[in-house]
Amino acid sequence: MIRQESQEEANDAVESYKATVKEQAEELVIKKFPERIIHFNKLLNETPFLCEDLTSVHSDLKIPVPEPQIINNHDGDPPAKKRKAVDGTEEAVMGAKVFILPSGSVPINSHITLMVDTIKPLIRQLVEEANLLKMWVSFLIPKIEDGNNFGVSIQEETLGEIRTVESEAAAFFDQISRYYMTRAKLVSKVAKYPHIDDYRRTVVELDEKEYLSLRITLSEIRNHYATLHDMITKNMEKIKKPRNANSIEAMY
């Protein structure tokens, strides 16, 4: 008896969960999605996502260029690299060994980091809300039967679009982590070879590229919300009631 009551309580809890998901999903699509779209349009037209001049995205690495060190080789030890001096003697050109930078740690790009801090919660929000919509449509799919499956095909197409949005949103996180790793490697190259301007320029190009990429990412998040809102609202009736009982009765 106790086990049967527990099973009934579990079933009631599951049904309550399903009802909550359906209620939250409909409110999300009808009320919150338009608010999200308007908010993202506003962000795209404000700093830090709007920069008419990309030089504002640049960040000073604060890694000075040291004076070149030329050491005469008089102790007989073979240097790693040699070149001929003016007087004909062999001299070793030593690279810069990085023990500590004069300005301390190399600062991150504050502009890009502000963009990242703004967009990461939005990406997580999109993933969670796409997951909620996915469960909502899944709960609305009726049992498998022959005939009258046009509404079910709409549900499945909507479900496929939601899954695509969820997958693409999750991939945005990888893009952010790759940027910081790539930039760290380039900055370490600048610290080791501070006299090579190409490394410094590569950091600048990477920052500009990430700015554009994050702006596009925010646009894509807005587009995902707009696409889901448009698709679901246009087909809300078929998504909620994929099979019409009247059409079945009319067949007989």
Image (tube, rainbow, N blue to C red):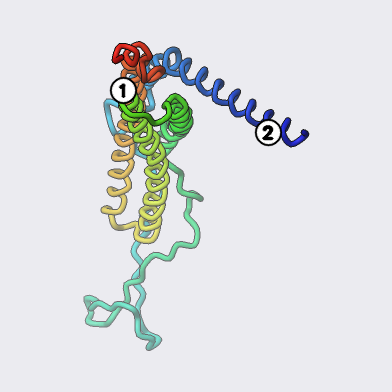
Task: Write down the quadrant of residue 196 in the picture.
Answer: bottom left
| x 31%, y 25%: residue | 149
- Cα–Cα gap, marks 2 and 1: 34 Å
Report the side of 131 relative to 155 (left or right).
right
Residue under circle 1? Answer: 148
User: For the C terminus, which image quadrant?
Assistant: top left
From where the camera sits, is residue 118 visible? no
Q: What element carries label 2?
A: helix
| x 31%, y 43%: residue | 204
From where the camera sits, is residue 231 visible? yes
Q: What residue type is labelled 1?
A: Asn
Residue under circle 2? Answer: 7
User: For the N terminus, which image quadrant?
Assistant: top right
Depth check: 10 or 21 in front? 10
Query: Residue 69 placed where, x, y %?
Result: 36, 67
| x 31%, y 20%: residue | 231
Q: Residue furthest right?
A: 2
Depth check: 28 or 135 in front? 135
Q: Residue furthest front?
A: 252
